[in-house]
Image: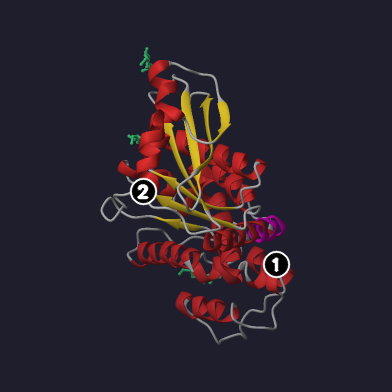
């Protein structure tokens, strides 16, 4: 429904501009046949008609719908109709959006206007949207805003491992580092690892890369039921938020692909207090310039007192 709101919003704006005479009424640039109104662009124009016909989506009987709002209501209603093939039905919003974009492309860039392209893109976008949204729901990404973060490290439930991660980032030209440490329901360390990554443009990207590296490592070790705890609210936000998703698209794509292999994967925001071990492991990279990476069973002995203390939590 998000897309629907965007579309209605864009159309409302166009309609409003027109009502106030700010956009001169002109001949439709796509079909050059009829005055360009919103209804014209979306349903009456030759290209729009072709799109609806090829996508096997019926238009209302002549005279039933008159205004843009009538048409919007009609299309919204179609999305719940069983008689329309699923792949086109789920793409209705994208089709409307695609037609609208073609009109803009024609108007401002002088190209566009191909019904087949509109349909192909709409199907693809609807598929992608569905994929990301459905995966979104099974991925439990917990975001807590600053307050309410746990202030004591807690053991995970039996059968699930808890993985604390941290990445360190100094600036866009320095190598960054990542670390993770996996503990069980008794607070015992199973593995811990450290690695150095190529420079990242910012802290969020560093943490996203770290998340992917951690997921890959866990999969390699066949650790499939796991909680990942990261301090980076921004990285969790990026993994959870579609508004900004295009900026991190390549990371999100890889995240969702890796995610499919886990039985249970939960990402939760950790406080810095409960993430000390991961932080200490990684800070040796950026602070002491130790770039060699490793994976080890058990915990680092130099941190055993903190680990022992936390295991009682
Ligand atoms: C377009 O608008 C003009 C001016 O309002 C009107 O005279 C003309 O008949 C309209 N053309 C069509 C095809 O509706
Ligand atoms: C990044 O940090 C290093 C050392 O902290 C410094 O030498 C380098 O000039 C910094 N680079 C930029 C682009 O700020
Ligand atoms: C890693 O841990 C340190 C210390 O708690 C914290 O300042 C830093 O923000 C963490 N890194 C990320 C990417 O959250």
Task: Decide whether the magenta segment is chiefly helix, strand or loop.
Answer: helix
Spot occupied by residue 37 in the image (x, y as percentages of width and height): 49, 67
Left or right: where does residue 154 sit relative to residue 221? left
Labelled disc at residue 123:
none
- The verdict on residue 59 being magenta is no
Labelled disc at residue 50:
1
Spot occupied by residue 305 in the image (x, y as percentages of width and height): 36, 35
Characterize the local packing of mark 2: few (<14), some (14-19) or many (20 or more) Cα atoms within 10 angstroms.
many
Q: Which residue appears at 69% of the width and 55% of the height?
A: 117
**Residue 203 visible somewhere in the drawing:** no
Residue 302 drawn above or below residue 158: above
Element at label 1:
helix
Q: Which residue appears at 39% of the width and 30% of the height?
A: 280
Q: Quadrant of residue 40?
A: bottom right
Q: Which stretch appears magenta?
A: 116-123
Q: Quadrant of residue 130?
A: bottom right
Q: Which residue appears at 40% of the width and 31% of the height?
A: 303
Who comes first in sequence, dot 1 or dot 2?
1
Q: Quadrant of residue 251?
A: top right
Q: Badges 1 and 2: C-beta atoms under 8 Å apart?
A: no
Q: Is mark 1 within 8 Å of ligand 1?
A: no
Q: CA distance from mark 1 to mark 2?
A: 60 Å
Characterize the local packing of mark 1: few (<14), some (14-19) or many (20 or more) Cα atoms within 10 angstroms.
some
Spot occupied by residue 67 in the image (x, y as percentages of width and height): 47, 78
Labelled disc at residue 153:
2
Left or right: where does residue 230 sit relative to residue 161? left
Look at discs 1 and 2 and give the one toward the viewer. 2
């Amino acid at each position: 429904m998000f897309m629907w709101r965007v579309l209605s919003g864009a159309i409302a704006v166009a309609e409003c501009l027109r009502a106030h005479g700010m956009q001169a009424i002109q001949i439709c640039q796509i079909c050059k046949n009829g005055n360009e109104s919103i209804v014209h662009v979306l349903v009456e124009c030759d290209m729009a008609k072709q799109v609806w016909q090829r996508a096997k989506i019926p238009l209302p009987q002549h005279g039933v719908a008159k205004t843009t709002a009538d048409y919007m209501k009609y299309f919204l209603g179609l999305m719940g109709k069983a008689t329309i093939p699923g792949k086109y039905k789920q793409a209705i919003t994208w089709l409307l959006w695609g037609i609208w974009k073609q009109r803009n492309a024609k108007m401002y860039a002088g190209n566009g206007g191909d019904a087949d392209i509109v349909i192909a893109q709409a199907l693809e976008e609807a598929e992608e949207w569905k994929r990301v949204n459905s995966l979104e729901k099974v991925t439990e990404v917990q975001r807590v805003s600053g307050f309410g973060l746990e202030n004591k490290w807690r053991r995970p439930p039996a059968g699930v491992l808890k993985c604390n991660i941290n990445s360190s980032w100094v600036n866009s030209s320095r190598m960054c580092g990542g670390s993770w440490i996996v503990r069980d329901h008794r607070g015992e360390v199973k593995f811990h690892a450290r690695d150095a990554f190529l420079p990242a443009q910012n802290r969020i990207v560093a943490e996203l890369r770290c998340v992917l590296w951690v997921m890959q490592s866990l999969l390699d070790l066949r650790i499939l039921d796991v909680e990942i705890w990261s301090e980076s609210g921004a990285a969790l936000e990026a993994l959870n938020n579609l508004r900004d998703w295009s900026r991190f698209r390549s990371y999100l794509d890889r995240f969702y692909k890796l995610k499919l292999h886990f039985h249970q994967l939960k990402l939760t925001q950790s406080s810095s207090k409960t993430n000390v071990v991961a932080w200490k492991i990684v800070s040796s990279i950026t602070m002491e310039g130790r770039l060699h990476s490793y994976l080890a069973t058990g915990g680092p002995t130099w941190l055993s007192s903190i680990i022992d203390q936390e295991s009682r939590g």
